[in-house]
Amino acid sequence: MFVVVIGAGQVGQSIVQALQHDHNVVVIERDKDHLEALTQYDVMAMEGNGASLKALQEAGVDHADLVIACTNIDEANIVACSGSKQLGAAFTIARVHDTEYMETWERGRLGVDLMVCSELLTSELMAQIIGVPAAREIHTFAEGRILLAELFIEKGSPLVAQPLKTLDLPPGSMIASLIRDGTVIIPKGDDVIKVADLMVSVGTPEAVGILNRRATGQSTPQNIVIIGGGRIGYRLAVTLEKQRLRPKIIEAGIERSRWLAEHLPRSQVFQNSGTDLEFLESERFGECEAGACVMDRDEKNLLSALLLKSLGVEKVIAGVVDAHFIKVFERVGVDVAVSARKVIAEEIIRFTKSRITGASILEGDRAEVLEMTVSRKSPLIDIPLGKSSFPKGAIVGAIVRKKQVIIPCGDDSVQAGDRVIIFSQKEAAAEVERLL
């Protein structure tokens, strides 16, 4: 497939890294430093303005199978996609921050085939993480019918030292993988869970929630604070309100605080920086069960997150502007660091996969979760999974057959047209795609 990527910042480079080996990729970028960074990838890079028809023509968008506009400027991305479409591009994807553009796009007025909003996706992900307190990451598949959660196993968990075959897992769930010291393990029945493992569970949202409570003893938080009332903070509050929760929001701006109070009827809004320890203590925010720090600067998010942790908040999520800081945040005490750039890159990447309707990247690109439709030509059809030639570095986590969700065992088999959720080590992903 011939792909043109416009913008080579963190999002663009993540996309390029994922596509470079399987596709013919051309990248348009104005910034010389970003162009220099592209030399490490097997792509053609050209300097130019991706919103310019001249640059688009030089890149060959007239015969492009896919154009991805992922700069930091919403308007530039929309113009680039619209121009590419006029020149003959088969499919265009625009990255945006502002949800208002989504509303216009949904009415079919922008000439963009697919629009993905980083703030909307990030706020939805944070809400899902809050709903499964022990989860480091959450991924949804099959229109939300299947949930994949990375659960951090702490000392004292009743699952520690238990062979997997002895665990009484909730119906509708399975343990797809254990990630131990950066190594991805596709477990067998005799494998045991250890302290500090990341346990990757797959199943229905209800079953994964039950497994979370069994693994940690934590219930779903009810008392939640959001620090930062920008686009992500607002969208997160809207999502929580729809769950009949009453979040507390701390916002520094006076006018923005007033606006939030007017538009969030179930939320309590406080006008403060969110990094004022005396204020946080006096308002007893340490009694909150979960917190999300979503301001526009990494240092503010880190400071406010650590303050909440010091006050006793059990689960703290921090937004990260620079995706390179995710591990730093989590190393110094933040429970979960979420990068909107990483979230949006993964969402775009999944649309480049043939027959793959969903894809997520785990553990620094060491593992993939794929949502695929089984081809009529698949050699695995009607063969019990336990007796099939399915790669050892992969496991079928769920089968969606019409309205039925199946968490398979060795006796189950796939059928043509099934949608399957696959957890795979990076090395096995290509073989999985070939077999299905």
Image (cartoon, grey):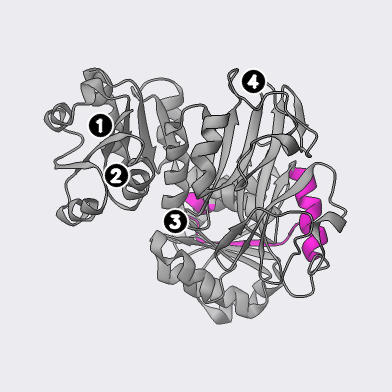
Q: Are marks 3 and 1 in contact (CB under 8 Å)?
A: no
Q: CA distance from mark 3 to mark 4?
A: 52 Å
Rendered image: mark on residue 71:
2
Q: Earlier in the sequence, mark 2 or mark 3?
A: 2
The amino acid marked with disc number 2 is Thr
Residue 209, position as x, y percentages in the image: 77, 51
Q: Is residue 435 magenta?
A: no
Q: Are marks 3 and 4 in contact (CB under 8 Å)?
A: no
Q: Nearer the viewer, residue 192 or 221?
A: 192
The amino acid marked with disc number 1 is Ala
Q: Nearer the viewer, residue 53 or 391?
A: 391
- Disc 2 residue crowd, few under 14, some 14–19, many 20+, Cα 10 Å: many
Q: Are marks 1 and 2 in contact (CB under 8 Å)?
A: yes
- Where does the magenta region start and end? 205-233
- Residue annotated with mark 3: 255
Q: Are marks 2 and 4 in contact (CB under 8 Å)?
A: no
The amino acid marked with disc number 4 is Gly
**Which corner quadrant holds the N terminus?**
top left
Seen at 32% across and 24% down, the residue is 65
Seen at 70% across and 53% down, the residue is 131
Q: Nearer the viewer, residue 170 or 250?
A: 170
- Residue annotated with mark 4: 417
> Taking 397 as reference, is 69 left or right?
left
The amino acid marked with disc number 3 is Glu
Residue 206, position as x, y percentages in the image: 79, 44
Q: Quadrant of residue 246?
A: bottom right
